[in-house]
Amino acid sequence: MLDARNHQGKFGEDYVRALASAAGLLVYQHDLDQDGVDLGFRLPGRSTGVASPCIEAQIKSWSRGEIKHGVSEWYFNGLNEAQFNRIAGDDFTVPRFLFLVRVPPDNVDYVEFTTEGMLLRHLAYYCSLRLESPIAHPDKKRKRPVRVPVANVLTTRSLLNLVRSVELVARSTA
C-alpha cells in the first residue's frame, strides 16, 4: 500500500486524468519529471486551424485548504521556489498551469459510491502563472505561495477551454 503522501499525490493526478478522459483529451507524461510537468493534455487533430493544441500542468494535491469568509482565493503554500519557476513566466512553448486538487484528509473519503455512480472528492482548481516573474535565485528550501481563484474550478469544460485557448493564441500570433 502507498504511504499517505504518495497516495494523495497519485489520487490527485488520477482525478485530473479522469477529467481529461471525460473531455476527450489525450494525456501524456514525460519519462522523467525533470521539468516541473506532471501531465500534458492534447486535443487530437485539427479543430479550428491549429493542429493538436496542448497544455501542460504541475499537479498538486492538498488536504488542508480553507477559505476564509469573504475571500475568493485559495492560498496555496505547497510550491518551493524551484517548482514555482518551472511553471511561472510567459516564455514556455507549451502553456503551463498549476492544477490544485483539494482532497479529504482521510483517503477513505476520496470516493463515494451511490446507486447513481461514483463521486470523486473534492474539487480541482487551475491557475496560470504566466504573468508571474520567475524568481532570480530560487531556493528549494523556500516556499513560494500562490493564490488560486476559487472560481477556477477544473471541469471537463474548463480543461477543454484551457487547451482550446492555445488555438486562439496561435491564430492571433500567426
Image (spheres, grey):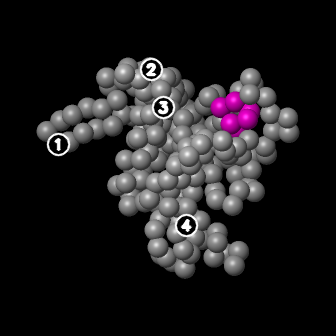
C-alpha span from label 4 to label 3: 26 Å
x and y percentages locating residue 91 in the rendered image: 75, 57
Name the residue type under label 1.
Glu
Name the residue type under label 2.
Ala
Q: Which mark is residue 53?
A: 4
Q: Disc 2 on helix, strand or loop?
A: helix
Please tell me which residue is depicted at 75% across the width and 25% down the height of the picture.
142
Please tell me which residue is depicted at 41% across the width and 47% down the height of the picture.
17
Q: Earlier in the sequence, mark 4 or mark 2?
A: 2
Whether pointer 1 and pointer 3 mark residues with C-beta atoms closer than 8 Å, the reply is: no
Q: Which mark is residue 90?
A: none
Q: Earlier in the sequence, mark 1 or mark 2?
A: 2
- 10 Å neighbourhood of mark 1: few (<14), some, or many (≥20)? few
- Residue placed under numbered mark 2 in the picture: 4
Which of these two is toward me, 136 or 155?
136
- Residue placed under numbered mark 1 in the picture: 116
Q: Disc 1 on helix, strand or loop?
A: loop
C-alpha span from label 1 to label 3: 27 Å
Q: Which residues are magenta?
A: 79-84
- Residue placed under numbered mark 3 in the picture: 9
Q: Earlier in the sequence, mark 1 or mark 4?
A: 4
Q: Earlier in the sequence, mark 1 or mark 3?
A: 3
Q: Disc 4 on helix, strand or loop?
A: loop
Name the residue type under label 3.
Gly
C-alpha span from label 1 to label 2: 29 Å
Which of these two is toward me, 26 or 134?
26
x and y percentages locating residue 158 in the rendered image: 47, 55
Per the image, is 130 magenta? no
Which of these two is toward me, 145 or 150?
145
C-alpha span from label 2 to label 3: 9 Å
